[in-house]
Image: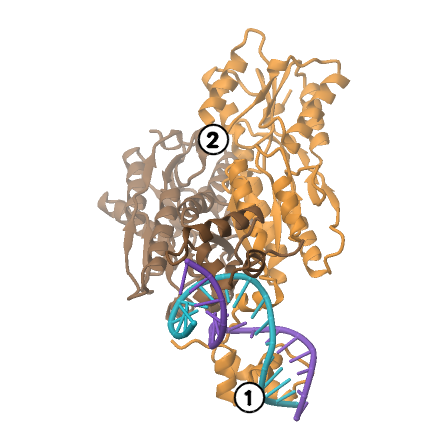
Chain colours: A orange, B brown, C cyan, D purple
DNA sequence: GTGAAAGCGCTAACAT
DNA sequence: ATGTTAGCGCTTTCAC
């Protein structure tokens, strides 16, 4: 099939390239009549402009990158829905990049954005990421970056987050209110903003209620589920074991339930559990799972919204918007008194 | 920051554009010495070629599109992992498009690919899709298309599928073997390949074992979870209700468990359940869920592999590869005798 | 109201 | 071994 580009249209209509181009973009300097002829033919031949040719001229590809640790995770997949919803209206396209929690990959991915593959970047950093050099470099090249969920405070860029500290606090307080005396915290990184903030909230709640947390009650989980299983098992096999668990990420739900089952510890009688999770299926677990549910869709949607604003405006000073969308504690069976 | 492009490099080194270009691509017609100088400077200035400029010349953007109904679904999100793994090595980038099960959106999305935004397309069609016109049009424009999971048989393109018929058969037979006498099937579309094939397997299994299925035992679920809940409830409230359920998609798991709980029907004693699902969490449901688990990662990986082959080869006749990767029946508590 | 021509960044055919 | 040039498809001055 011969390709239909502006040149083809122009020849067919016996007009010049520029007239056709202008007509297609509905320029006021083209007569109504000509516009109509052009647009009609374009529709008939199913003309679609070559996005990257315009990109080359105007240095905007209408592509944005979304960099996340993982897709197979309800928070991130729902966030993508939000991003897509916001972006679609404005005609942008979404490129997905997975770091699999590796800083090296994150760097390599960002490197590719230095010459116009995408107009802007939405990122939730890997759990290994401790420095923002790679991101600053991108910003220096005038590629707008917006963080969502997992942010790097040291980088001056817009950030969309949830109230991690408060959520950690609330989750912990909820367990205390329901009778837990010794509460463990399952985190995923020493450096990650969300994990840390949630942990600080946890510590504050303990402190406010006169409870102490032996260092051994805080566990950093890894991407290796076997390792996590063993670590949690060890935690719950102690003579004086915790009677409450705050799990800071969804992936740990299965681990906690499995370990409890293996050790014949009944939830919530022996151990009460709250998990940060967006899994719809939490309702049908046994017992149903008390969760801190993050506004995943809204966060994705807001992050994309801010990025689009940055993109459509003239790129003045990098905006330092900060939006906080609260999470909700949804009480279910796993934390019952 | 001033942009570093080939021209900048050339000026700095006092070489011509083409020499630099060739040196960067490690051409044999450039002296070792020059190559070294060029590559050194490029590294130092952090030069990244503008992908879309090369795209314009060579009409390949190194972008591929993945079109799926939904990301917040374990099958599709795991499939994306497989796609990403296959594609990354070869330096391709992944654009994600969600149809939300709408045919109209699917058409609109494909339309955008007619002029080089992506080099190739991986698609799992929406449940509303019954015709392949939009896809054929793309193929006519020489954009390679590979189907995975949800295919359209009428379109001549490569297809990566799982053994849906056999899986439907096995799931049903498994329930029969475990004592179910009346088995319902929850599908999602009259036209969709997977739902149909699974249903045909279900019907065949019933027939082979001398069981009949009143038409009312086959329910087509929608994207409206409330509707589904009511439909399944109605199904199980009948005087002579089914004692087995084959649910053809993951989203229906929650519905089935909730309805059973609401009606005080114990799984598996009152109703046995098998669900097509890749949810890791199936193991900790109560009872744990018997599943048909699809090779999601492998299917995504294989589909991307075939597409890359199509892309790297000369685009001769559109290959009609068909790869079938079997699913596995994983027996757990929900179907116990 | 329409057209000619330059140029976005890069590559490849064609000199030298 | 290195350089010159044309052109990918499109937009945008700048002429007419």
Residue B333 seen by the camera: yes
B135 to the left or right of A118: left
* D3 to A98, vertically: above or below: below
- Which circle, 1 or 2, is nearer the viewer? 1
Residue at (75%, 56%) from the top-left corner?
A: A316
Residue B223 rendering spot, x and y as whole percentages: 51, 52
Residue at (38%, 45%) from the top-left corner?
A: B184
Bin the neighbour count of mark 1 within 10 Å (Cα to Cα): few under 14, some 14-19, many 20 and up: some
Which quadrant is home to the N terminus of chain A?
bottom left
Q: Secondary structure at mark 1?
A: loop
Q: Label 1, on which residue?
A: A15
> Which label was assigned to residue B138?
none
Residue at (40%, 42%) from the top-left corner?
A: B241
* B303 to B282, vertically: above or below: below
Observer-nearest of A113 and B203: A113
Q: Quadrant of residue A292?
A: top right
Q: Quadrant of residue D11?
A: bottom right
Residue A235 rendering spot, x and y as whole percentages: 54, 15
* B144 to B72, vertically: above or below: below
Chain identity of mark 2: B
Residue B103 seen by the camera: no
Which quadrant is home to the C terminus of chain A?
top right
Q: Quadrant of residue B337?
A: top left
Q: Label 2, on which residue?
A: B285
Are labels 1 and 2 assigned to the same chain? no
Observer-nearest of B271 and B94: B94
Residue B63 rendering spot, x and y as whole percentages: 47, 57
B94 to the left or right of A26: left
Q: Secondary structure at mark 2?
A: loop
Residue D7 rendering spot, x and y as whole percentages: 47, 75
């Amino acid at each position: 099939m011969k390709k239909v580009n502006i040149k083809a249209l122009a020849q067919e209509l016996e007009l010049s390239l520029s007239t056709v181009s202008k007509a297609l973009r509905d320029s006021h300097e083209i007569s109504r009549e000509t516009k109509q002829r052009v647009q009609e033919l374009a529709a008939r031949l199913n003309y679609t402009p070559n996005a990257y040719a315009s990109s080359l001229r105007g240095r905007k590809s209408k592509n944005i990158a979304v960099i996340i640790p993982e897709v197979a995770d309800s928070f991130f997949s729902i966030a993508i829905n939000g991003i897509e919803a916001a972006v679609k209206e404005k005609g942008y396209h979404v490129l997905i990049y997975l770091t699999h929690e590796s800083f090296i990959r994150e760097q390599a991915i960002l490197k590719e954005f230095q010459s116009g593959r995408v107009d802007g970047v939405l990122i939730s950093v890997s759990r290994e990421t401790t420095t923002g050099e790679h991101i600053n470099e991108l910003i220096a090249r005038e590629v707008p970056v917006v963080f969502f969920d997992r942010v790097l405070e040291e980088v001056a860029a817009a950030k969309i987050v949830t109230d991690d500290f408060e959520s950690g606090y609330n989750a912990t307080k909820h367990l205390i209110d329901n009778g837990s005396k010794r509460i463990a915290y399952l985190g995923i990184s020493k450096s990650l903003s969300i994990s840390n903030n949630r942990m600080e909230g946890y510590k504050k709640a303990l402190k406010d209620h006169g409870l102490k947390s032996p260092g051994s009650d805080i566990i950093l989980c890894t991407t290796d589920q076997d390792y996590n299983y063993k670590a949690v098992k060890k935690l719950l096999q102690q003579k004086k074991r915790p009677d409450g668990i705050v799990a800071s990420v969804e992936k740990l739900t299965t681990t906690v339930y499995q370990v409890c089952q293996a050790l014949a510890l009944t939830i919530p009688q022996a151990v009460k559990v709250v998990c940060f999770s967006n899994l719809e299926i939490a309702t049908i677990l046994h017992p149903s799972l008390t969760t801190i549910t993050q506004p995943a869709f809204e966060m994705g949607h807001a992050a994309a919204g801010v990025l689009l604003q940055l993109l459509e405006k003239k790129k003045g000073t990098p905006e330092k918007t900060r939006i906080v969308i609260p999470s909700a504690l949804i009480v279910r069976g796993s934390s019952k008194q």
